[in-house]
Image (cartoon, grey):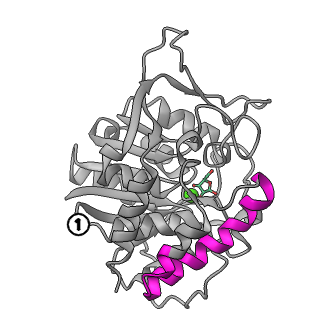
Amino acid sequence: PRKIILDCDPGHDDAIAIMLALASEELEVLGITTVHGNVGLERTTRNALVVREVLGKSVPIYAGADRPLVRDRISAEAVHGVSGLEGPHLPTPTGQVEPQHAVHFIIEQVLRYPGEVTLVPVGPLTNIALAMRLEPRIIPQIREIVLMGGSIDIGNWTPSAEFNILCDPHAAKIVFGAGVPLVMMGLNLTHQTIAHPERVARFRALGTRVGNFVAELLEFFREHHVQRYKWDGAPIHDACAVAYLLRPGLFKTAMFNVEIEANEGLAFGRTVCDYWRVTGRQPNCEVGLEVDVDGFYNLLLERIARYA
Ligand code: BDR
Ligand code: CA
């Protein structure tokens, strides 16, 4: 199995990404690391513990950065609710977070398995950037970074910027400039995965506790997307990064140069994608363009059904 570290800020779609990863024998999840983002670090970490509890799995969880490198912290309670995981009943987690800091864990694991560890960040990139700065020797040893963030076109938090990148544009600049093989699942792709009510009903129809949990997450997550975008459901952004590792054939991707705008201004936090190759800059990022959305949902359902 492929060794991954899932770096996340749960979050409804983060929770589903965790479920997909932990249900899949193709992946060995070395650990889950948490970061500030959708809500504060204390809550994203608690939510990771809650999801682990719901799944009955035993993966270690490490808490990371509680704020961005330079800018002020922003968060998304308006989308994910106060807890960050509103909707289903959330059990009180019995397990604990590991004492080691997420950034130290990432460094330790990459150095322990040189060339083998894939990082899967689906929140702000603060932990990954800090790990690269604290121990630059990890940079050539990271197998690949497959992330959810950015967009080749419109943003969601500003007209230019996607939330994860906007949360910490300076961290994103470090990560996109590191020269590590990079795959970006941005909004242009994830917005193809709308969980409309018929799709939600398929999770409920599994008749399992975890199937219901997913349905309740998606029902709450839908509300904001109906109001803001007039869509019939929420995209399951973060699960796209994990699904890509499991079934790359479901995705159409292409190499582009992607640079991060880290200057404050209209385009702060934008992933500037040289789609028409007008800059002459070297492609540094494999960008998700299209997903076979039925294939994506079939995969997700098949894996969620494993939690009987
Ligand atoms: C991203 O922002 C968060 O709200 C989601 O969890 C996802 O990672 C989408 O812009
Ligand atoms: Ca997320």
Assign the C terminus to one quadrant of the image: bottom left
Q: Nearer the viewer, residue 252 or 157?
A: 252
Numbered circles on residues, count = 1
User: Does residue 113 show up?
Assistant: yes
Q: Circle 1 — which element? A: loop
Residue 118 on the magenta span: no
The residue depicted at 67 percent of the width and 77 percent of the height is 86
Residue 269: quadrant of the picture:
top right
Is 211 left, or right, of 169 in this rendering?
left
Image vertical order of residue 264 relative to residue 71, above or below: above
The residue carrying mark 1 has its beta carbon less than 8 Å from ligand 2: no
The residue depicted at 56 percent of the width and 60 percent of the height is 35
Q: Nearer the viewer, residue 56 or 222?
A: 222
Q: Position of residue 39 (x, y in %)?
A: 67, 65
The residue depicted at 55 percent of the width and 45 percent of the height is 149
The residue depicted at 68 percent of the width and 60 percent of the height is 232
Ligand 2 quadrant in view: bottom right
Q: Nearer the viewer, residue 175 or 242?
A: 242
Residue 207 on the magenta span: yes
Q: Of helix, strand and loop, which mostly describes the magenta segment?
A: helix
Image vertical order of residue 111 relative to residue 282, above or below: below
Residue 306: quadrant of the picture:
bottom left
Q: Position of residue 138 (x, y in %)?
A: 32, 42
State the residue position of label 1.
Answer: 25
Disc 1 residue crowd, few under 14, some 14–19, many 20+, Cα 10 Å: few
Magenta-drawn segment? 202-229
Is 182 left, or right, of 77 in this rendering?
left
